[in-house]
Image: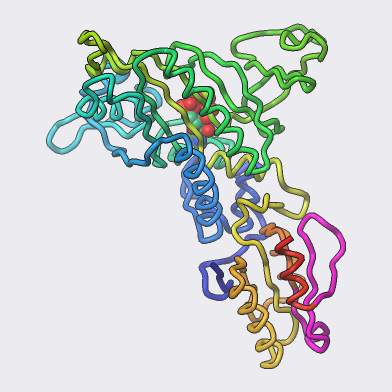
Amino acid sequence: MAMKQSEILFKTQKTPPKDEVAVNAQLLIKANFVDKLMAGVYSYLPLGFRVREKIEKIIRKEMNALGAAEILMPSLQPKAIWDATGRWEGLKKIMYQFEDHAGHDVGLAVTHEEVVANLAQGLIDSYVDLPKSVYQIQAKFRDEPRAKSGVIRGREFTMKDMYSFHTDEKSLDEFYEESKKAYIKVFERCELKAYVTEASGGDFSKSFSHEFMVETSAGEDETYLCRLCGFARNKEIADFKKGERCPGCGAGVLEKVKTVEVGNIFKLGTKYSEGANLNFKDEKGNLRPVVMGSYGIGIDRLMGTAVEVHHDDKGIVWPPEIAPFQVHLLTIGAANEELQKFAESVYHKLCEQGVEVLHDDRVKISAGEKFYDADLIGIPWRVVVSDRMMVQEKVEAKKRNEKNSKDMKPSEFLKVLKK
Ligand code: ATP
Ligand code: MG
């Protein structure tokens, strides 16, 4: 997959919007990945869209490996299913709720436990139907009071939410542990170290949960962390004294650090199945409520967190697996026909080999601007073609996170890239 910069809706911004304080939003807006419509609501432009696709691809692979099947549920939901679990009133402050023209109360999805439990109710009858799991990648709406963290806290955002259904706690526990491992894999592929953190059930469930916390000064959460063994506990559920020893390993000293919650897994028990009459017949023919779990990852939040962790004073430094492209090809110099031909030939050579290339083929843009933009956008490899390079039939290749470039033939570069 390749793109020419001259052909896409693209313009980097020199100054970020004044009302954006978060580094992730400043960089993503400056580099033209997102456009802000209002507080906590963003459009995703061609580059940003590709990063989302990369993240979604990683997540789909890991969720499918757990045996979960992808579905899609609606954002617009009737009040009745939320009344059945008693959450319509409780979520009033955060859920967009309104009356439609026919006079029915409806709301926009803050999460999907109610919908998924209702639909599963028609599909699960007996223990032979269990365990099962489904997931979706879909929009959520929350009237967040403090939408100041850029795409890390949106009022409209995309979540991967997965739900699992079980006959008993033991089956839930097994799936829960597998999901933990899958989550760690997802975050590792995004080059984020996520600490599995003990947390409370929060607003959405009363039972125990685990949060996946990434350390960054942009974090809104505070976590006690042991760097020795990885023990982590949310400050919301425990306060440790300064310098206290880790209760996990007894050797490390706990540190209080700022973190972003990129994912969250919950053992829901039977709360939502009871609301939706989601029961199954056990081996003895007794009717019992289905035991559920729910598992979330914020797509936009993951992207924003990656930017917070992977950037420098010049711009974003994308982890390769979620970079919009692998190679940023820059044509530098006077727009003479010969140079353009050479640049095209390099472009096609890379495309033929399946390399994802963004070609900065824009004319009337100075070399300085192109280099500035390339650093801001943060694609892992920058490959320059210029008149000087053309006479040697070479390109100048440089990694985004390294200082020095190297001149090489396009074929040599392909070898380096594939290593
Ligand atoms: P927080 O405590 O940060 O408000 P939460 O605990 O309410 O989040 P969940 O309801 O568990 O979040 O949602 C699952 C995942 O969705 C979170 O781990 C996070 O990655 C993502 N998420 C939640 N709220 C937002 C938001 N406003 N914007 C972007 N992503 C979000
Ligand atoms: Mg939370």
Q: What span is colored magenta in the figure? A: 384-408
Whether the magenta-drawn stretch holds residue 403 is answered as yes
Q: How is the image coloured?
A: rainbow
Q: What residue is at 34 percent from the left and 13 percent from the top?
A: 270
Left or right: residue 292 versus residue 18 is left
Closer-to-camera residue (99/167):
167
Q: Eyeballing the image, is 69 above or below 117?
A: below
Location of residue 327 (image quadrant) = bottom right
Location of residue 249 (image quadrant) = top right
Q: Eyeballing the image, is 144 above or below 342?
A: above
Quadrant of the drawing holding the N terminus: bottom right
Task: Give the x, y percent position of residue 401.
Answer: 79, 54
Q: Eyeballing the image, is 143 above or below 350?
A: above
Left or right: residue 167 versus residue 378 is left
Q: What residue is at 19 percent from the left and 27 percent from the top?
A: 122
Q: What residue is at 68 percent from the left and 76 percent from the top?
A: 365
Task: Give the x, y percent position of residue 160.
Answer: 45, 37
Closer-to-camera residue (95/254):
254
Q: Name, please, the residue furthest toward the left.
A: 102
Task: Give the x, y percent position of residue 222.
Answer: 66, 21
Q: Eyeballing the image, is 14 above or below 250?
A: below
Whether the magenta-drawn stretch holds residue 382 is answered as no
Q: Is residue 83 visible?
A: no
Left or right: residue 55 versus residue 408 is left
Location of residue 94 (image quadrant) = top left
Q: Name, please, the residue furthest toward the right.
A: 404
Quadrant of the drawing holding the C terminus: bottom right
Task: Give the x, y percent position of residue 218.
Answer: 67, 34
Q: Can residue 125 be seen in this view?
A: yes
